[in-house]
Amino acid sequence: MTIATDTATRIMANARMHLPGALDSAIKLQFFEVLQEFFNRTDCWFADTVIQIVPGQQAYDISSIIPAGARIARLILAVTSAASRSPAYLQLPATIMVPQVYYNVDTVHVWVSFTVDDPTDTATGYPGVPNEIVERYQSGLVDGVVGRMQMQPNKTYTSDTLGLFHWRRFNAVVGEAKAEAARGFRLDGQSWMYPQSFHLSRGRNR
Amino acid sequence: MLDTVSDYIIEARRLLQDQAQPYRYQDSDIVAALNLCQTEITRIRWDIIVDAYPTLAIPTFVDTATSDPVPIDIRYRMPVLYYIVGNVQLRDDEATQDARAAALLKQFVGQMTQAAA
């Protein structure tokens, strides 16, 4: 799971255009931070697994579903075999805790979201993330990188005004991605999303 | 261009008008200025140092190893040259040299921290 070369090239080229004199290593550093914040806030990178409950056992390790270069951000949902919400919770880094002790064999279906983590790819320096998500929200991620870098002091690309502008655009895309992920990327989801003043779309799937 | 210690010495001598032996400014003086420049860069543009030396093992250049590479990003090599020339000329006490040295050192800081400098 890694960013495609074309996608990474486009992102870096876009960022370089906005950041005169910025070093690629500095851009990649901020790109990692932006991706971490993006996935932490949107939960749009997720996976599920079914835990086989063992009577008397409360802790279940799910580290096997974590992709390389990622870590679990949070537990999104846990549902029992009876389709009711389970009070299971996540004990970091990757242990599902089932508070009540089960006396019968059962299953709990859990969904967890991921965010980027070290190590990054040794050859390219990019974190391991689904390329499809990066491609979908590419412009917003570029805004995040550019915004963060432009707000650094005493650099050749420093610009508080433009930095704030790009950061707000990034925040708008974060809101859009969070809403889209929450409604499962369905076309008939809700049309309202926060923040209203930075609507980049009408709220429906493009 | 400006890839090695030797390149910096040659270009600095060109700007210093010090290309005929016996030299006014020794190679050791120019290399010392190069080392001082690296410390200045760590102060004002730490990202350039991290890019040049990812393991943060910043070398000390010597005039006996002039083929050693200076891996500063290509966009910031001219400011390094300006710093070297300005620093070397600081020791002169003629008014014109003082002004030129100050201007070059200011140019170094300007090009490191501003887009159009």
Image (spheres, grey):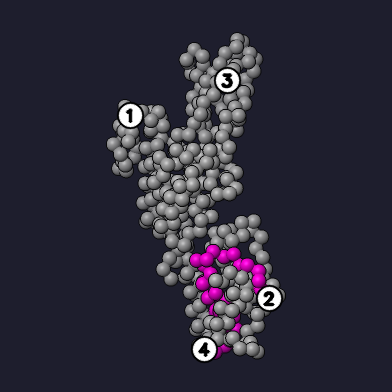
The residue that appears at 66% across and 65% down in the rendered structure is: B59
Q: What is the three-letter code of the residue carrying label 3?
A: Ile
- Which amino acid, by three-letter code, is at mark 2? Asp
Q: Chain of mark 3?
A: A
- Name the residue that disc number 4 marks: B95
Image location (x, y in percent) of residue A107: 56, 16
| Residue at image coords 56%, 28% | A90
Mark whose residue sits in front, 2 or 4: 2
Label at residue A187: 1
Q: At label 4, which amino acid type do we have? A: Ala
Q: Residues within 10 Å of mark 3 (few under 14, many from 20)?
A: some
Residue located 59% across and 23% down the image? A97
Q: Is residue A67 magenta?
A: no
Q: Work out how far the residue at label 3 is from the one at label 2, CA to CA, in angstroms.
A: 66 Å
Residue B6, percent from left and from top: 62, 75
Which chain does tag 4 point to?
Answer: B
- Is tag 2's residue or tag 4's residue first in the polypeptide sequence? 2
- Label 3 sits on a secondary structure element that is strand
Please indicate whether residue A150 sits to the left or right of residue B85 in the image: left
**Is residue B93 shown in magenta?**
yes
Residue at mark 2? B63
- In the image as oriented, which residue stretches furthest toward the right? B64
Contact flag, marks 3 and 2 (Cβ < 8 Å): no
Do dots 1 and 2 share one subunit?
Answer: no
Distance CA(mark 1)–CA(mark 3): 31 Å
Left or right: A41 as drawn, with respect to B55: left
In screen coordinates, is B15 left or right of B65?
A: left
